[in-house]
Image (cartoon, helix red, strand yellow):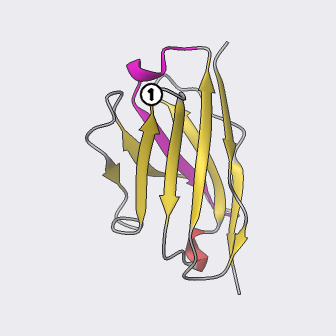
Amino acid sequence: QVQLVESGGALVQPGGSLRLSCAASGFVFSSYTMMWVRQAPGKGIEWVSSINGAGRNPRYADSVKGRFIISRDAAKDTLYLQMNNLKPEDTAVYFCEQAGGYRGQGTQVTVSS
């Protein structure tokens, strides 16, 4: 059974940093591209970043490019999102998603002074 469990969300001031984690289980982690998506209040799902199964070819939405870094640890079956220089418009529930269509329950990130 595929499970994706996100953690690391918090309330942070503008300009601050957070690192999100997504613990994966129930599938061969290294076989799948993984991604982060987010949903801001009252808006639809927005793709944020993705990385292939080998941990290469990271891609980013223009809105986060240069501020966020996606990575994965094959030994821990864990996906990460390092978020720097956070802005109020980054406020959203962040989900990790497997390329096969599974999505976690999400973790709340709120950027506010």
Question: Which residue, as the protein is rendered here, is positioned at the far bottom?
Answer: 113
Q: Is residue 39 magenta?
A: yes
- Residue underneath mark 1: 74
72 above or below 47?
Answer: above
- Image quarter (top left, top right, bottom left or bottom right) of the C terminus: bottom right
Residue at position x 62%, y 33% in the image: 23
Asked if residue 42 is among those painted magenta in the image, a careful observer would answer: no
Q: Position of residue 107 (x, y in %)?
A: 71, 51
Q: Position of residue 66 (x, y in %)?
A: 34, 68
Magenta region, residue range: 27-41
Residue at horizontal 35 percent and vertical 65 percent from the top = 65
Q: In the displayed structure, does residue 39 sit left or right of residue 47?
A: right
- Can the viewer see residue 44? no
Q: Which kind of residue does numbered mark 1 sit on? A: Ala
Foreground of the two, 106 or 83:
83
Residue 8 placement, left or right of 58: right
21 sits left or right of 70 in the view:
right
**Residue 67 in sight here:** yes
Mark count: 1
Residue 68: x percent and y percent?
Answer: 43, 62
Up/down of 90 relative to 27, above or below: below
